[in-house]
Amino acid sequence: MHRRVTILAALSMLTLASMAQAENLTLVCQGQGEKLGSGYKSGYMWDDKQKKYVPQSGIENEMRPYAAAVTVRVSGDSGSVQLPKSMIPPIHGSGDGDGWWPLNDVIVGDREVRASFKLNGLNHPKLRIDRMTGMLTMSGTGFDFTGRCEKTDANERRF
């Protein structure tokens, strides 16, 4: 009888531990980053052959800074990330229309959360949240983002 109680107690503790690991997190991360942009440029450039400045124009790609807020929801080994319009590339897919993308390969540890998501066929950004500092780092093709996260509860008012 004593052995049965001990086994039941151990199973109860394991169940509680697994329930604690499947915590629900909703984080709002304010920060900044850079994204690839392009624009029409015109000006003058030195021509060594002609030994003078000549007019030039064309489209140039460059990294442009931006500020944004990203929301991350994690529940166990699944989750989603909401990106503002300023971070979404012109060619994108798999989002639900509200800017939410499902997270893949979610790993929730004591010190960090890691995941990736699919913006389009070529862009699969990776994100990492340091649970000790609250810092989110995210990088994909043509953009990066770093922000400080705050835990929020959708059922509680802020003020």
Image (tube, rainbow, N blue to C red):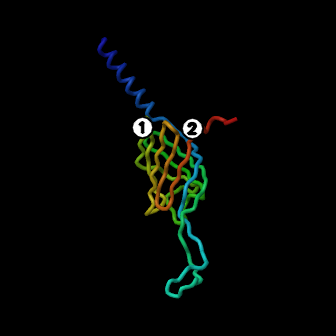
Q: Which residue is at the front of the view, 147 or 44?
A: 44
Mark 2 = which residue? 151
**Dividing the picture into quarters, in which one does residue 7 lie?**
top left
**Dividing the picture into quarters, in which one does residue 89 lie?**
bottom right
In terms of sequence position, does the residue under pointer 2 or pointer 1 come before the other?
Answer: 1
Q: Identity of the amino acid at label 1?
A: Gly
Q: Is residue 114 left or right of residue 41?
A: left
Q: Secondary structure at mark 2?
A: strand
> Which disc number belongs to residue 37?
none
- Looking at this view, name the residue that lies furthest to the front: 51
Residue drawn at x 40%, y 31% is 18
Categorize mark 2 by other alpha carbons within 10 Å: few (<14), some (14-19), many (20+).
few
Residue 99 x, y percent position in the rendering = 57, 55
**Which quadrant of the figure contains the C terminus?**
top right
Q: Which residue is at the front of the view, 124 or 139?
A: 139
Does residue 6 lie above or below 36 as drawn?
Answer: above
Does residue 10 lie above or below 132 as drawn?
Answer: above
Mark 1 = which residue? 109
Residue drawn at x 57%, y 62% is 64
The number of callouts visible is 2
Residue drawn at x 47%, y 49% is 127
Q: Is residue 87 left or right of residue 11?
A: right
Does residue 49 lie above or below 102 as drawn?
Answer: below
Q: Is residue 110 left or right of residue 86?
A: left
Give the Cα separation between the discs numbered 2 and 1. Answer: 16 Å
Residue 88 x, y percent position in the rendering = 55, 59
Q: Identity of the amino acid at label 2?
A: Lys
Q: Secondary structure at mark 1?
A: loop
Residue 9 x, y percent position in the rendering = 37, 19
